Image (cartoon, grey):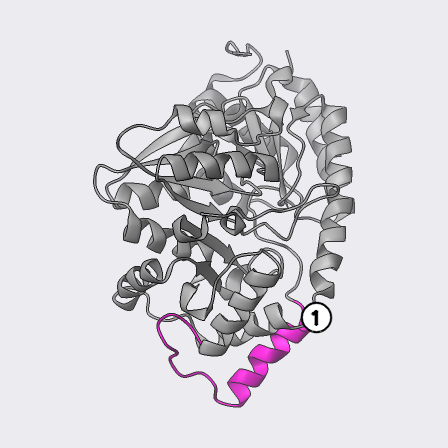
Amino acid sequence: MTMNANPNIPDEVRAVAADGTQLRYALMEMAREMDDVIALGRGDPDLDTPPHIVDAAKAAIRDGRTDLTPIQGMDELRAVIAEHMRSVNGLPVGAENVMVTTGGQEGLFLAIQALIDPGDEILVPDPRYTSYDDAIRRAGGTMVSVPTNREDAFNLEAEAVEAAITSASKALLIVTPSNPTAGIVTEDRLRAIADVAIRHNLIVIVDEIYGKIVYEPWQHFSIGSLPGMAERTITLDAFSKAYAMTGWRCGYVAAPADVIDAMARIKQVTTGPVAAVSQWAGLAAISGPQDCVAEYLQIYTDRRAVLLEGLDRMGFAYGEPRGGLFVWADCSSTGIHATELSYLLLNEGRVLIFPGTAFGDAWREYVRITMLEPIDTLREAVERMLPVLERYRV
């Protein structure tokens, strides 16, 4: 559905909402200056880092284990990450295939800089988290969008990937579960995509940072575990989401050893090794008790149910959120463009959400809403949003 201008929207609102990409930052700035805002915009977990992880960091500081580590990360952490990825993800990797990065975002940036040359094309699902754009642009690459759709829960199709391939195509980016759509790429689709990648000699960069946050009955699957894929797959992950460690800035990459070496050369002259304290915390996270992961997943599952019930009341359609911390909702039933709606909900309802245009120019009828507030707060957010919608709905 393509919406016409809503006659109920004041001209000054249209003017403020005209730039959907910059509006995301303008909304965050507005929210900081307001009282009593319910923040359902940014994707940083609101839960506390588990105590045993915090204790491990304190012990590292107390014991003086804060020296610079090897550029690729502490040997013991890389070994445990490799074991985890072998046993949990089925990836045939050793410590030599692992690098510890300053968050998942640096892992993506380093991989793109190491692999993409000027003129190379990289296929990217649409919609997408726009930090990918910056990394590709800085490498001189060209981003080629691969469409996904709500009716298919934003699952990626091998046919769509193959249709986007040209003689300049070098790599494919897969994000599963996805930010912003909360869709996953299912095992059957990944098997078909792997066949496409092998036939067309594509490198696959797969962002699995939400891989431990998948809702029943769905399951996460790693494309790098498939035959013929280990030598062409770069797998990105981090402790940020599953362990509520966003601010610790500790991620990791699994890739062929020559790719890790190339990434290490870039990291050596830019950020250097990840802070030792954060690495000790990451070691405690991945090697310690995993009850916290299951506990947090249950919290998100309960919140997801409340948020979806609220969106049903608001008359929003959405792709089934199968993983991650968001709902990607179609607001076209309101007759209000997503940029204008996001502004109105903050200005009049004190609820911060992000317009879909922040994740791709085509998504003017979508909003991304996070579930990163307690259940009672999510219910309050719905009650604040409903009267704003009724006031401006056509």
Quadrant in the picture for residue 189 = top right
Residue depicted at 63% across the width and 17% down the height = 334
Which quarter of the rendered picture does the C terminus lie within?
top right
The magenta stretch spans residue 59: yes
Residue depicted at 48% across the width and 86% down the height = 65
> For this rendering, which residue is in front, 33 or 97?
97
Which quarter of the rendered picture does the N terminus lie within?
top right
On screen, residue 323 versus residue 128, left or right, reads right
> For this rendering, which residue is in front, 159 or 327?
159
Q: Residues within 10 Å of mark 1 (few under 14, many from 20)?
A: few
Residue depicted at 35% across the width and 53% down the height = 111
Q: Position of residue 195 (x, y in %)?
A: 46, 36
| Residue 240 to residue 190: above or below | below
Quadrant in the picture for residue 48 = bottom right
> For this rendering, which residue is in front, 82 or 57?
82
Quadrant in the picture for residue 188 = top right
Does residue 245 appear in this view?
Answer: no
| Residue 394 to residue 178: above or below | above
Residue depicted at 46% across the width and 29% down the height = 357
Does residue 270 appear in this view?
Answer: yes
Q: Amino acid at mark 1?
A: Pro
Q: Position of residue 42 (x, y in %)?
A: 55, 46
Q: Position of residue 173 (x, y in %)?
A: 42, 41
Q: Position of residue 354 (x, y in %)?
A: 54, 35
Callout 1: SS? loop
Residue most toward the left? 118
| Residue 220 to residue 296: above or below | above
Q: What is the number of callouts on the image?
A: 1
> Which residue is labeled 1 in the image?
289
Query: Which portion, as a residue range, is magenta?
Result: 50-74
On screen, residue 152 versus residue 305, left or right, reads left
